[in-house]
Amino acid sequence: MFRTTTPAGTNPVLIRSNIPPQWRPARRVDLCSIPNVPVSPFVEAWAQYAYFGFSDNWWFPDGPADVWRRTLNVNTWQWVTDPQNRSNTANSSDWPSLSTFRVTGWREVTDQGQDALWARFDGEAQSVQLYTGGGRNIWYPHVNLALEQPDVVRLFFTECISPGTYAAKFVRAIHQFDEGETEPYPYYSAEIGLKTESPYCTHRDGARFYGKWSVDFARESLNYRLLYLDPMYRYAVRAVLYQEGGNDVVEAVTLCGSVVAARTIRPGVPETLWVDVPSGLYQDARVELGVNRLQGDCAVLACLDVYQYEGLAGHGGGAQGRRTQPPLTSPSLVVTAVACDAATIKYELPRAARVSLTIFNLAGQAVRALVSPERLPRPAGSYTVTWDGRNGRGQAAPGGIYFCRLQTDLGPLCHKLVLTR
């Protein structure tokens, strides 16, 4: 049995004030029919799910211990019916590590008395051995999954080279996961409830502060322009509606003018709403979101987050859909390398088109024009541009998240990149 808890809610005002989050009371987590005592817990959070990895009592000599993984829906507090994802290897396994629901990694000892690193991939019936050390010399494995094409799994660990000498290493494996249904991951957040409105907000009447919560409000309608939506990917929006008036408030949420949901918000009770954004709405890399008052004194919004799905839009239906590339009928944009001070950007034109290529920051401000708007079309073909990490005045841009926007006669594309300093 373990105990777990989740934050009761926070917002940018609390974070900037260095006020720690309020935690809900810890709840007991029963791990369902585990034959031995579970130890070495590892927890990974992904959207509304918590994934528990653990070993079943590896230090008792009553048979080899296994690594297990279980999935808990923290909204309903119910276990998800899925395969147990048990390591099922001949030797004892310990030190589990998770990377979302996709991959579980751990250490175990071989018959020859050597430490080895193993992994189990989601959807696979058998575990695989990724690395073998030179003795009992592997410590603290940690698995990481990079969603690429194909997907890359890295298992980081510490290895004892000689007495008193240690090295940090990793082993790399390629695996093609079945797309199927995927969970979204955080892309960016609009700062809501501040004295100064968010750059993503196009209309509000002000902000209200309710102690732990702060909200944007408008007498009739709140409006936001969500940017940097790459038409090659799918997105979802998470909105939290909250108010502390005397009566219920009824609000409608719209995307590009169409109502997608309506909710009743009771005083003091936050209402969380998830909305999938249809890919056809953001062919120009942006979408308009509104929160409209239907009943009550005003429209309110406490939190606005944009999530991106793992898979490419229109390329679900299994791994085969990702292996086969469709004919190029629209421009492509790829950031192929990001270093501490530079990024290499490649784009391809299926036919002649005029081009502009610009780097933007999170506030939507232009940082550097890499290719200025052109009067004459460029021939079809592949092009490469390097951004040296500087703005238009030649000054080093601060580290953080940026967006590369390619605008052509054939349509826009946007790609996120991270500049580290």
Image (spheres, rainbow, N blue to C red):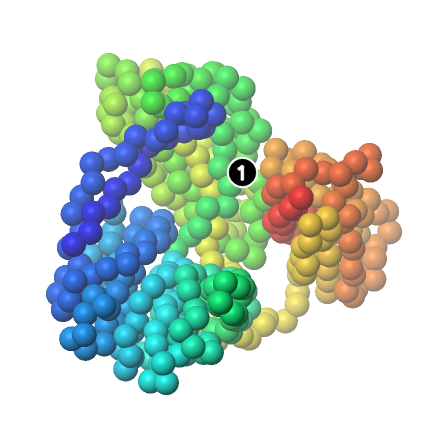
SS label for mark 1: strand
Judged from this view, the residue extending furthest toward the bottom is: 112
Q: Does residue 294 appear in this view?
A: no
Q: Residue at x 71, y 53 (%)?
A: 343
Task: Tell me the quarter of the image containing the N terminus.
Answer: bottom left
Residue 307 is situated, as x and y percent measured from the top left of the image, at 46, 46
Q: Residue at x 54, y 27 (%)?
A: 198
| Label 1 environment density (alpha carbons within 10 Å; few <14, some 14–19, many ≥20) | many
Q: Is residue 198 left or right of residue 40?
A: right
Judged from this view, the residue extending furthest toward the front is: 163
Amino acid found under the numbered disc labelled 1: Leu
Looking at this view, is 277 or 369 the one in front?
Answer: 369
Q: Which residue is mark 1?
A: 226
Residue 295 is situated, as x and y percent measured from the top left of the image, at 30, 22
Looking at this view, is 133 or 44 the one in front?
Answer: 133
Can you tell which quarter of the image residue 221 is in? top left
Can you tell which quarter of the image residue 296 is in? top left
Residue 197 is situated, as x and y percent measured from the top left of the image, at 53, 22
Residue 266 is situated, as x and y percent measured from the top left of the image, at 24, 25
Q: Residue at x 27, y 62 (%)?
A: 54
Instruction: In the rendered view, tell whether residue 401 sits above or below residue 232.
Output: above
Looking at this view, is 290 or 244 the one in front?
Answer: 244
Judged from this view, the residue extending furthest toward the right is: 376
Q: Residue at x 52, y 55 (%)?
A: 233
Task: Tell me the quarter of the image containing the C terminus.
Answer: top right
